[in-house]
Image: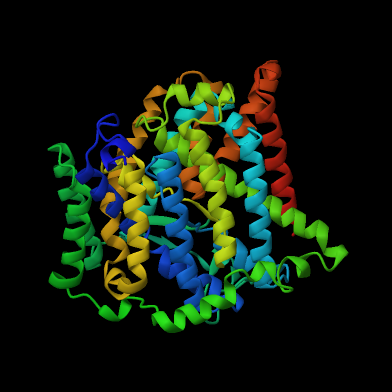
Amino acid sequence: MKSLEQFFDFKGHGTTFGTEVSAGITTFLAMSYIIFVNPAILSQTGMPQQAVFLATLFASAISTLFIGLYANVPYALAPGMGLNAFFAYTVVFALGFTWQEALSMVFICGVLNVIITITNIRKVLITAIPEALQHGISAGIGIFIAYIGFKNANLFEFTVSNENILSINGEATTAASGEIGTLVANGGVLPALVNFTDFTTIATVIGLMITVLLIMRGSRVSMLVGIAVTTILTLFIIDFDFSQISFVDNSIVNAFKELGTTFGVIFTSEGLPSLFSQPERIPLMLMTVFAFSLADIFDTVGTFIGTGRKTGIFSQEDEDSIMNRSGNSKMERALFGDSVGTIIGAIMGTSNTTTFVESAAGIGAGGRTGMTSVVTAICFVLAAFLSPLISIVPANATAPALIAVGIMMVSSLREIDWDDFSDAVPAFFASIFMGLAYSISNGIAAAFIFYGLIKTAKGEAKEVHPIIWVSIFLFILNYIIMAII
């Protein structure tokens, strides 16, 4: 029987068991917010909150364990932010599908993604992306991650003037009146640095300084120490309001009873059969599945490109094997694992389960093998029993790790020829715009569209890989569909 060292090849990947454990815990802490946020969002559709809580944990644990053991990569999967909001607010509330039908669409999306991966489409897409865009995407992921950290640290405040408010609580409006739940405004929003009267922000800045100093000294536990210090400062030294902590009522017995409501519901009469029971809704359903799939695919592709190549997790041999259709490269197995994760999530009872960009925190902490994922998966299982303790770790505590990782990844910008405007424009959208748009897939979409436009204007359209042209068409089609629905 192989030892852990032999199975994961710690030495060959330049890591150790202790580093992998530390990295796995770091990844979990960076993404642990999802186990509380996901139930809060999906329960608005009528799904039992405790059921979604367990579904989130088990889908994340099983998917993360699968990709770690099958692909030997340090990535973690969980229900994706943005995709869960699309599930609730667009598919259920705006389009009128039931949550059971929405879960069925997520399942179809997962099956579609598996087919796309097996038939080599998604794998060829990765190798078809031009080098300048690859570097731009890598840097963009860094900017995106750092921006998440800045938001979690409450370092920014935003001012919205009355005339710039477009909608309140999802309804169009021309005045900022009434009780506001969610608010959408146009470009009149002005970001600014806070005045540091928020003690949680001060704690985060101190934690970030400690993290940076430890990284410079070569510490392998710098991320964890930064998280621990920020947590302690926020909770115990600073006058923190514990009522702000969100606890999920997660009595294990009751939670398992409710899980029976969502587990496998897609195979009941309320799921897949109901989804296809009205022929007139099938075109709308197919468009929705397409939107789910496109966002899921490009979020994953962007995450793998942004975090995997710079750190050596995915090598040149991996890319070559994709082109040779060997079917056994690390990247191929990782893509397959991500696709299977969406299917597992749908069966459990949650929205699209996808590779989390916060995996970069564990990679930044030194994680290089699937052992990191195994540790993160174990943490998800333990969270079923330790959720009150985990919820004590505030969101701002993981901000130093995310910001530090973002700084490391932005170095890819130096590989781009900024003097060549034809490279600079798509690389800009793949990097800077990705962070500003707060979306990996939208950043890649803008980069692809401008890349195709520039190549066509230069008379070099034939140099663009056919897969890129197909992707550009699909992106534009997706925006048209989203405008319609």
Farthest-out residue, right: 280
Front residue of 19/148: it is: 19
Residue 350 in sight from this viewpoint: no
In the picture, measured across the screen, residue 386 lies left or right of residue 285, that is left
Residue 154 % position (x, y)? 32, 61
Tell me where residue 164 appears, x and y as whole percent: 56, 62
Up-down relation of residue 59 to residue 173 (above or below) = above
95 relative to 7, above or below: below
Instruction: List the single residue furthest toward the front.
Output: 1
Q: Position of residue 108 (x, y in %)?
A: 68, 55
Residue located at (39% from left, 40% from top): 73
Question: Is 279 left, or right, of 123 in this rendering?
Answer: right
Residue at the image point whose x is 36% and y is 76% from the top? 246
Q: Where is residue 444? Give x, y as percent.
A: 56, 38
Would residue 400 appear left or right of 31 to someone viewing this image? left
User: Relative to 60, is 182 above or below?
Assistant: below
Quadrant (top left, top right, bottom left, bottom right) of the N terminus? top left
Residue drawn at the location 38% of the way across and 47% of the way down: 359
Which residue: 68% across, 63% down? 104
Q: Is residue 377 something one can see in this rendering?
A: yes
Task: Tell me where residue 364 sits by quadrant.
Answer: top left
